[in-house]
């Protein structure tokens, strides 16, 4: 089940931080802290890989709210979507581990924002994700170009080109065929 209580708590905390002036610039790193609970575990009593991706949602929410993007999303009837992701799992997260999720903007191109996220348990890195994200118009469903989004936030002429590994992933993902009904 989706962690709605954690989501609500996260939104309230991030919003209060934003109102108190604990804001982030787009080059800053968001950090949220959690404790692994029984609802996060799989049958081996370690955090489920799907739950890790779900908890990364909370990190991106915090980043969006504290950079002011959240306000713009609501005001302009925009949405925040994930269009692709890649993740590495390196260390198990166990029940009651203290977790830290760090989120920052890794790169920007004309259409996409590339978000890098890491999960740390008890001070050790556990997983690392790269996500291609975008802002969409809720009415049309179309992705809004990054320049328009950044201008709305007061950031003009942002240059954040992808590192070689980020570009390699983006290029490789373009080669990947998407399933078609006639190909099944």
Image (tube, rainbow, N blue to C red):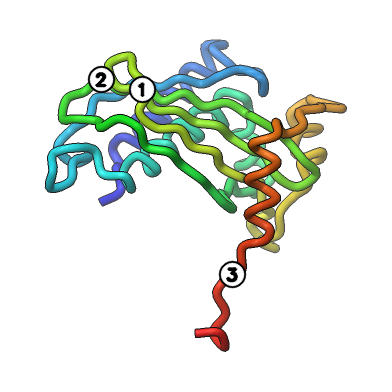
Residue under pointer 3: 178
Q: Is residue 59 above or below residue 171?
A: above
Q: Earlier in the sequence, mark 2 or mark 3?
A: 2
Q: Nearer the viewer, residue 78 or 103?
A: 103
Task: Report the number of discs.
Answer: 3
Residue 11, horizontal then vertical, whole percent? 43, 31
CA gap, disc 3 and disc 1:
32 Å
Which residue is drawn at the image coordinates 54% and 17% (left, top)?
Answer: 19
In screen coordinates, is 35 left or right of 90?
Answer: left
Label for residue 89? Answer: none
Residue 80 location in percent, x, y?
A: 59, 46
In the image, farthest residue toward the right: 157
Q: Which residue is mark 1?
A: 120
Which tag is nearer the camera, tag 2 or tag 3? 3
Label 3 packing within 10 angstroms: few (<14), some (14-19), many (20+) = few
**Residue at the image point whose x is 78% and y is 25% from the top:** 154
Q: Which dot, 1 or 2, sits closer to the camera?
A: 1
Instruction: Tell me the residue that label 2 is attached to.
Output: 98
Label 3 sits on a secondary structure element that is loop
Q: 69 left or right of 153?
A: left
Q: Position of residue 135 (x, y in %)?
A: 66, 46
């Amino acid at each position: 089940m989706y962690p709605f209580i954690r989501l609500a708590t996260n939104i309230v905390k991030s919003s209060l931080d934003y109102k108190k002036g604990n804001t982030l610039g787009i080059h800053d790193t968001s950090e949220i802290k959690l404790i692994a609970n029984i609802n996060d575990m799989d049958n081996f009593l370690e955090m489920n890989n799907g739950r890790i991706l779900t908890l990364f949602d909370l990190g991106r929410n915090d980043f969006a709210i504290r950079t002011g993007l959240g306000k713009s999303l609501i005001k302009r009837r925009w949405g925040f979507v994930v269009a692709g992701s890649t993740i590495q799992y390196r260390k198990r997260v166990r029940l009651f581990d203290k977790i830290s999720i760090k989120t920052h903007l890794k790169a920007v191109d004309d259409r996409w924002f590339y978000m890098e996220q890491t999960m740390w348990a008890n001070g050790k890195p556990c997983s690392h994700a790269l996500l291609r994200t975008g802002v969409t118009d809720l009415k049309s469903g179309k992705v809004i170009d990054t320049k328009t989004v950044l201008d709305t936030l007061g950031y003009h002429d942002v240059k954040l080109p992808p590192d070689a590994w980020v570009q390699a992933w983006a290029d490789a993902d373009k080669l990947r065929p998407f399933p078609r009904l006639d190909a099944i």
